[in-house]
Amino acid sequence: MYTIGQICKRFGLSRSTLLYYDAIGLLPASTRSASGYRLYTEQALQRMLQVQTYREAGLPLDTIQSLLASSTETSASVLERHLQDLNLEIQRLRQQQHVIIRLLESPAALNNSRTMTKERWVEMLRAAGLDEIGMNKWHAEFEQRSPEAHQDFLESLGIDAEEIQRIRQLSKQ
């Protein structure tokens, strides 16, 4: 059996977090000692490992609770939906980055933003020795191996949807 202090220490949680998990039924104490202290079994420890992993993946507590209680909904489907949501959020954040860079009108802002533009990317590919044919091959290979990542990459460069569609079409030929 594990005490609340041992669980907190092992998982780097505060006592109040563990008490909250208990209160919402996410990680109830397995039993109580004669003096009323919460005690947790090895099974509870394993459950906490699952909770921690799902939290690291960014899942909210109510979703984690549903996953752990459900025998019908698979974690894979929940994680796939969460991954799609993350991809959309990343896309929105990239768009915000590009708008802010345009508003700042500063080359230093672009250099400090950890973003890449189409122009800078093409310059780097040319500096690496790629000509138009080489760049087209690069895009075709990217499109073949990972079409969604290719889409994401092109979006991250701030390329508009029409041009992305044209690049991807050429890459498939």
Image (tube, helix red, strand yellow):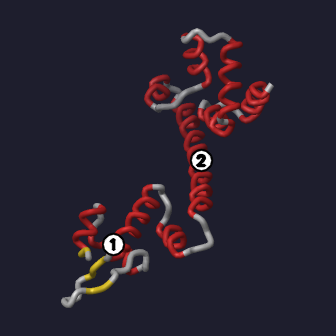
Residue at 69% of width from left, 13% of height from top? 132
Residue at 23% of width from left, 83% of height from top? 37
State whether residue 69 is above or below residue 161. Answer: below
- Disc 2: CA contacts within 10 A as few (<14), some (14-19) or many (>=20): few
Residue at 27% of width from left, 63% of height from top? 10
Residue located beneath label 1 in the image: 42
Q: Is residue 51 left or right of residue 131?
A: left
Please state the horizontal and vertical placement of residue 5, each as a whole percent of the image.
22, 71
Amino acid type of the residue that numbered disc 1 sits on in the rendered structure: Glu
Near-viewer residue (171 or 43): 43
Amino acid type of the residue that numbered disc 2 sits on in the rendered structure: Asn
Near-viewer residue (77 or 56): 77
State whether residue 37 is above or below residue 15. Answer: below
Secondary structure category for the residue under label 1: helix
Please state the horizontal and vertical placement of residue 55, each as a whole percent of the image.
44, 60
Q: Is residue 12 left or right of residue 168?
A: left
State whether residue 27 is above or below residue 151. Answer: below
Residue at 30% of width from left, 77% of height from top? 40
State whether residue 25 is above or below residue 172. Answer: below
Q: Quadrant of residue 46?
A: bottom left
Label 1 and label 2: CA atoms lie apart by 36 Å
> What label sits on residue 87 in the rendered view?
2
Secondary structure category for the residue under label 2: helix
Please state the horizontal and vertical placement of residue 135, each as a whole percent of the image.
66, 17
Quarter the C terminus occupies: top right
Near-viewer residue (39 or 23): 39
Quarter the N terminus occupies: bottom left
Q: Is residue 91 left or right of residue 166?
A: left
Please state the horizontal and vertical placement of residue 83, each as a whole percent of the image.
58, 52
- Circle nearer the viewer, 1 or 2: 1
